[in-house]
């Protein structure tokens, strides 16, 4: 069986369907697998456990892998790449700001404390924030999905605890993708990666850093514009291969 070159990290089982269009697009260009972290209501929210389980999965591989994650999945990728850079060929982040703990859960709980309204009404507002105006039937389905995601996602936030996570330094090639009209992880959070990565990495790694923002599509832009996002990711991977080839030629390997 062929070992996949790319691994998509999923920490939100209820929302993983919004990854499918991009996964199908990328699968035409590379072998790709999904790794899912499922958390029950009885388990504490712990990304440390997820990092350990992910390492158990990857440590038997004989070559590094491209990691991709959206939101908390991207945060998991960051945490893993920080501890096990030798197993990561590159890391692609979708809707992950320089303060990587920011997600839709953090916005929801912040509003929950400020606004004296029912949970269902607030979730209805979150549907509009995340997906824009939707038909009533679709809106109800999305509310149900978000409600389940609050219970089952590996997001570190809860009604009783809001977690602030400082920027995470990684020593692997990094591609940061955001969206200009994302109100959850806004453009400032995405653009701030540029300065942080430049200040905390070597010139060689800086040449392997790329930042790109989709003009529209909101927090799940990779679902609405999967073909465009897929092309940018492939372009990033190709640039790494090209740089490696040039480096090999410069030391006489070819």
Image (cartoon, rainbow, N blue to C red):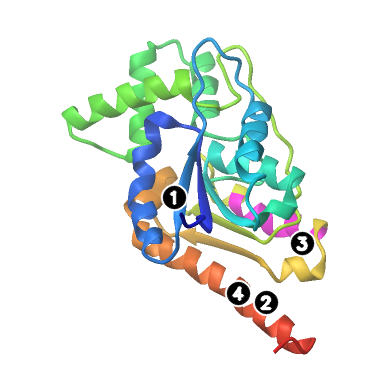
Question: Where does label 2 land, which residue?
Answer: 244
Q: Quadrant of the C terminus?
A: bottom right
Q: Secondary structure at mark 1?
A: loop
Whether residues under marks 2 and 4 lie with C-beta atoms below 8 angstroms apart, the answer is yes
Distance between mark 2 and mark 1 Cα atoms: 35 Å
Q: Quadrant of residue 132?
A: top left
Q: Name the residue at 67% across, 76% down.
A: 244
Residue 66 position in % (x across, y down): 58, 56
User: In the image, which disc is placed on residue 166?
Assistant: none
Q: Does label 4 or label 3 sit earlier along the sequence?
A: 3
SS category of the residue bearing label 4: helix
Marks 3 and 1, how far apart at CA: 25 Å
Q: Nearer the viewer, residue 189 or 100?
A: 100
Sequence-first disc among 3 and 1: 1
Q: Which mark is residue 181?
A: 1
The residue nearer to you, when weighing 52 against 234, is: 52
State the separation of the CA atoms marked 2 and 4.
5 Å
Q: Element type at marker 2?
A: helix
Of mark 2 and mark 1, the one earlier in the sequence is 1
Circles 2 and 1, Cβ within 8 Å, touching? The answer is no
- Foreground tag (2 vs 1): 2
Camera-side mark, 3 or 2: 2
**Residue at (62% x, 71% y) in the render:** 240
Residue 192 colored in magenta in the image: yes
* Residue 249 point in image, percent of width and height: 72, 88
Mark nearer the viewer, 4 or 3: 4
Q: Write down the residue under mark 3.
A: 198
Magenta span of residues: 190-199
Q: According to the image, label 4 marks what residue? A: 241
| Residue at x 64%, y 29% (from the top left corner) | 47
| x, y percent for residue 123 | 37, 22
């Amino acid at each position: 069986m062929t070992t996949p070159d790319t691994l998509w990290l999923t920490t939100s089982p209820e929302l993983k369907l919004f990854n499918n269009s991009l996964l199908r697009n990328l699968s035409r260009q590379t072998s790709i697998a999904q790794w899912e972290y499922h958390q029950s209501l009885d388990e504490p929210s712990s990304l440390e456990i997820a990092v350990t389980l992910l390492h158990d999965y990857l440590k038997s591989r004989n070559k590094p892998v491209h990691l991709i994650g959206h939101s908390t999945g991207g945060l998991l990728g960051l945490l893993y790449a920080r501890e096990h850079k030798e197993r990561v060929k590159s890391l692609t982040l979708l809707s992950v700001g320089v303060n990587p703990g920011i997600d839709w859960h953090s916005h929801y709980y912040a509003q929950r404390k400020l606004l004296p309204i029912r949970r269902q009404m607030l979730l209805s507002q979150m549907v509009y924030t995340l997906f824009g105006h939707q038909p009533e039937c679709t809106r109800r389905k999305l509310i149900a999905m978000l409600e389940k995601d609050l219970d089952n996602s590996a997001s570190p936030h809860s009604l009783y605890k809001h977690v602030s996570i400082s920027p995470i330094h990684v020593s692997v090639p990094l591609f940061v993708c955001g969206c200009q009209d994302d109100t959850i992880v806004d453009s400032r959070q995405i653009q701030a990666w540029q300065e942080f990565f430049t200040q905390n990495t070597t010139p060689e790694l800086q040449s392997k850093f790329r930042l790109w923002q989709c003009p529209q599509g909101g927090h799940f832009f990779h679902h609405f514009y999967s073909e465009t996002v897929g092309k940018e990711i492939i372009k990033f991977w190709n640039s790494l291969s090209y740089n490696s080839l040039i480096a090999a030629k410069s030391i006489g390997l070819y």
